[in-house]
Amino acid sequence: MNLVEKAYIFATAAHAAIGQKRKYTGEDYINHPVEVCNLIEKSTFVNDEMRAAALLHDVAEDTQLSIELIEKEFGKCVATLVEGLTDVSKAGDGNRAKRKEIDRQHTSKQSAACKTIKLADLISNSKSILQHDRDFARVYLKEKKALLEVLREGDTSLWLQASEIVEDGLKQLEEDK
């Protein structure tokens, strides 16, 4: 079994073990990491460590499984990417805006590979939120517009796609008023 197959099985089991489903649709949660993994295929520098990290990107944040366990199972490179993709703010750090600023600063220090995966995650989540929760999208897309500024080192085509989704979404929401 290769690294990507192992990551798929691990992530599927981790999210299923806590009964996690995709918000709004109720579909199996693994569909989101798979979409993120598929999106990074467009990157010119994608490799198996990035694919594995894309599949595992929400495991440490959403489950009780640690970065240390991910490192033990998948190696330092994958664990470093997953750690870079994991929000570091805590509920006690202040209001949502303050927490998002802490997470944005964390993201700004990550590698181009990490930022590429973050762009794919942003694309996947933005499309879903725009489709299913336009009220929350008003807040979410403004946050993602700010996040895009620290993701410029990621894959250019994904950055352009993410930027277009965010800008078009904000424009649509403004027209809805």
Image (cartoon, rainbow, N blue to C red):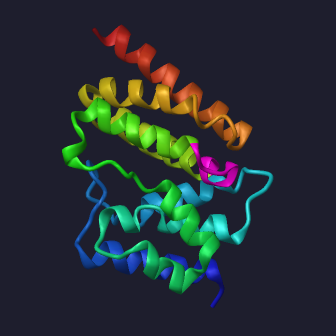
Q: Position of residue 24 (x, y in %)?
A: 26, 48
Q: Is residue 54 visible?
A: no
Q: Position of residue 41 (x, y in %)?
A: 69, 56
The residue that appears at 54% across and 48% down in the rendered structure is 118
Q: Is residue 22 left or right of residue 78?
A: left
Residue 99 lies in the magenta-colored region: no
| SS assignment for the magenta stretch, majority | helix
Q: Position of residue 152 (x, y in %)?
A: 66, 34
Camera-side residue of 26 and 153? 153
The residue that appears at 73% across and 37% down in the rendered structure is 156
Q: Is residue 156 left or right of residue 105?
A: right
Camera-side residue of 76 and 124? 76
Quadrant of the frame with the C terminus:
top left
Q: Is residue 39 above or below residue 63?
A: above
The residue that appears at 58% across and 26% down in the rendered structure is 164
Q: Is residue 73 left or right of residue 51?
A: left
* Part of the protein shown in magenta: 109-116
Quadrant of the frame with the N terminus:
bottom right
Q: Position of residue 155 (x, y in %)?
A: 71, 43
